[in-house]
Amino acid sequence: MARAVIRFCAGLSAALVLAAPAFAGPVTLRAEVNDSDGRVTLGDLFEGAGGAADVLVANRTGPTVVLDARAVQVMAWRAGLQWDNPQGFRRIMVRGGGGSTGGAAPTASPAVARGNVEVLSYSRSLSAGEIVQPEDLVWTKAVGAPSDAPRDADQIIGLAAKRPLREGALVSTRDVSAPVVIKAGEMVTVTWSDGYVTLTMQGKALKTAATGDTLNIQNPASKKVIEAVATGPGAAATGPEAQRLKAAGSQFAAR
């Protein structure tokens, strides 16, 4: 995400320098935006953008475009606008709209319910094992929400789909899990460490595992099987470090 933000800001810096708006002052993030042409501008995002309204923020090539709130804040400031982001948004998700259906809502996490419940849904279909990206999620209104619906998109972004997920389906935390980092039959580097001495060996994973999962690994020479905890792609820990990771539980997550 950080690389995307850097590229995003760098690509727009020239446009912001050339667009020297006469208006300067505080602005408010709009509750709705009509983005029928795929161009998201400061005027689409903010009320009171004045002369900076036509400054291009991003091009929407799919159903949604996800903007980093901090990057938007910096671009607004360079264009002479002041947005303090009082809600503390981290991302702004803009959906395509236009026509008789009205505008699309730029939403950010956490969502605020207005009338019906606002919940996350999938903006496109995902295959099993596919990693959820920011642009794959969009806030939408529904009569009700799943009992385990995430309150923040960050709870889902970076995780892997457990099964095929269809476009438009409401998001549930049961849909996703930590991405697989070790596959059954793969050779894995196993590390044993007590803080003073560190030993490593190569072993064969006997099952597929995500970061933080416990799995059995077989020594190919002795055929002895040991228990370890997956720590990353092709890597696992055993001994005291594995016990520490087990105790950490959900604090040790692949995000």
Image: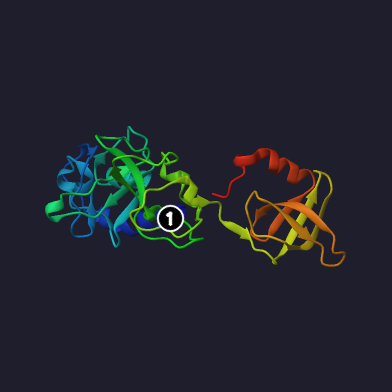
Query: Closest to the observer: 174 or 244?
Result: 174
Residue 251, position as x, y percentages in the image: 60, 40
User: Is residue 128 shown to the viewer in this render?
Assistant: yes
Q: Viewed as shown, does residue 224 lie left or right of 5? A: right
Q: Is 71 or 32 nearer to us in this picture?
A: 32
What is the crowding at mark 1: few (fewer than 14 residues within 10 Å), some, or many (at least 20)? some
Amino acid type shown at disc 1: Gln
Taking the spot 84% from the left edge, 48% from the top edge, the residue there is: 197
32 lies above or below 113: below
Residue 74: x %, y % from top left: 33, 45
Q: Is residue 12 above or below residue 42?
A: below
Q: Is residue 206 above or below residue 212?
A: below
Q: Is residue 44 above or below residue 208?
A: above
Q: Quadrant of residue 195?
A: top right
In this figure, which residue is indicated by the disc labeled 1?
133
**Residue 68 visible in the shown view:** no
Question: Is residue 171 shown left or right of residue 229?
Answer: left
Dot 1: element: loop
Q: Exactly how many numbered labels are in the figure? A: 1
User: Residue, x 82% and y 63% (percent of image)?
Assistant: 219
Residue 220 in the image, given as x and y percentages of width and height:
82, 67
